[in-house]
Image (cartoon, coloured by chain):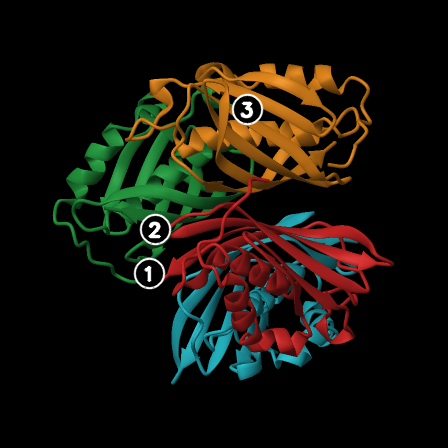
Chain colours: A green, B orange, C red, D cyan
Amino acid sequence: MMKIEARNPSFVEEVKKSFAAQSIMHLIGAALTRVEPGVVEISLPYRKDLTQQDGYLHAGIITTIADSAAGYAAYSLMPAGSAVLSVEFKVNLLRPAKGEEFLARAEVIKPGKTLTVVRADVFGVTNSEQTLVASMLGTMFCAR
Amino acid sequence: MMKIEARNPSFVEEVKKSFAAQSIMHLIGAALTRVEPGVVEISLPYRKDLTQQDGYLHAGIITTIADSAAGYAAYSLMPAGSAVLSVEFKVNLLRPAKGEEFLARAEVIKPGKTLTVVRADVFGVTNSEQTLVASMLGTMFCAR
Amino acid sequence: MMKIEARNPSFVEEVKKSFAAQSIMHLIGAALTRVEPGVVEISLPYRKDLTQQDGYLHAGIITTIADSAAGYAAYSLMPAGSAVLSVEFKVNLLRPAKGEEFLARAEVIKPGKTLTVVRADVFGVTNSEQTLVASMLGTMFCAR
Amino acid sequence: MMKIEARNPSFVEEVKKSFAAQSIMHLIGAALTRVEPGVVEISLPYRKDLTQQDGYLHAGIITTIADSAAGYAAYSLMPAGSAVLSVEFKVNLLRPAKGEEFLARAEVIKPGKTLTVVRADVFGVTNSEQTLVASMLGTMFCAR
């Protein structure tokens, strides 16, 4: 991937602060585990109360961590004083979402003044082995 | 919309049973409020612990109820003994997700033996007035 | 659908002018058949040289008329002096694209200052009977 | 990327044969330039008659080569006697589609018995320099 520079010197703090303000992340038990310019990771331990009818992580919860990771990957590149909004995303569910924990890794593929396009992959992790369970392609909006 | 016939005479019970087995629905407080052939609705009261950094419903939770509604709309048309899986979905977030409660309304636009295509709209509801906040177009898989 | 007002009094002429400037529409033989505020239709007679390996209209050509219809539906609501760009779209191919001709019908579901969200359906038409063959959900950008 | 094995020993011939039968590829002047297990490339020289109102390649034509590349990337991994159909795709248009020619590069990210998920990038090429202009995430169906 290309190397991207952050324009906001305090982007790490800003991302952490915004993530901490997302109540839903506390409810589901997600944690911010990586914040770099254009790249953000969120991890989520498996919990039975996050599942669909077969005991796998619900596609909406996969999307929840992928969308936040994608949003913050975009936000990490925005100028100070910006706010980030999700415009849209598309998610392909590739395999049953099994794992002891889940990792959403988002990467900006096209930064922009108004719109930023982000790809995010979600992995199920068991015994440190990662299996790709979903892939997202989405668009984020920079509001000032 | 076209009138669609269910092939499984006990589809209402099957949808209710599967919905009850989705632990995530209990966690977020969602309820199944309509089950007809090809049409399913899920409602979700606003709760602060379901929100993103600005206090609006998180896009992933909007997706959670839209995806379940879409999956069950597809499932309502599948033959007895089937299981439903989400293949993919795309969601456009149209407005900030404000409301006292939220309603996801899914409707099958193309039933199929293996793949069923579903549209779902999510509304924010305040004083009984509905505002469209998101629209999904997705694909569901019939496993036997 | 909601009734939407155009802000540019000469939106019909603007859409026609821009459509006429799309060389690809001439190459494939597409025609602009309806322009109303937030609603645009494009029709395309079947031609063998527009097909994929089985003799059906190629998904990319279905997308070509759906995207132009969607873009112009958005453009019809933009202020004078705007230009329209496609941000992204998702297309579900619902049935083999058979027909004597094809009709793309696009409708704005959320107009906006910067982003406009549009739904477009593409029908195969045989003996005046329309069959839905594809559905698009996309986002358009207003540049000034 | 993972190394994927083809199951059909004559997959290269099959892809070439099917591509040659896509009349639309002849009309627009596209050529198949790479066929490996799970990876296919299609190139398309710029032509004025393939453009939208600003002289850039129309998003539908970008999609046409991306969809064929994606379909054949999936097809390359299918067993003998299969046929491939596009289920759906989502395309983000990242930059104006400028270039002397265009290259669509598709790669399977999840092969499957019935459904195969493919990512495709489209580059504008000028003086041998590639610029990413669009990215697709799509689903292909294996019919027997």
**Residue at the extreme left of the image, as rendered:** A9
Sooner in the amino-acid sequence: mark 1 or mark 3? 1
Q: Would residue D52 appear left or right of C143 to someone viewing this image?
A: right
Q: Is residue A49 left or right of residue D30?
A: left
C106 vs C63, nearest the viewer: C106
> Which residue is identified by label 1?
A1
Residue type at the position of mark 1:
Met
Q: Amino acid at mark 3?
A: Gln
| Residue C79 horizontal/vertical position (percent) | 41, 58
Mark 2 chain: A
Name which quarter of the figure residue A31 lies in.
top left
Q: Chain of mark 3?
A: A
**Of residues C6 and B137, the one drawn nearer to the viewer in this rendering:** C6
Is residue B105 left or right of A85 when viewed as pictured? right
Please say whether residue D78 is visible from this viewpoint.
Answer: no
Is the C-beta separation of discs 2 and 1 under 8 Å?
yes
- SS state under label 1: loop
Q: Position of residue C48 (x, y in %)?
A: 78, 74
Marks 2/1: CA–CA distance: 9 Å
Residue pointed to by mark 3:
A52
Given this view, does label 2 or label 1 mark the residue nearer the observer? 2
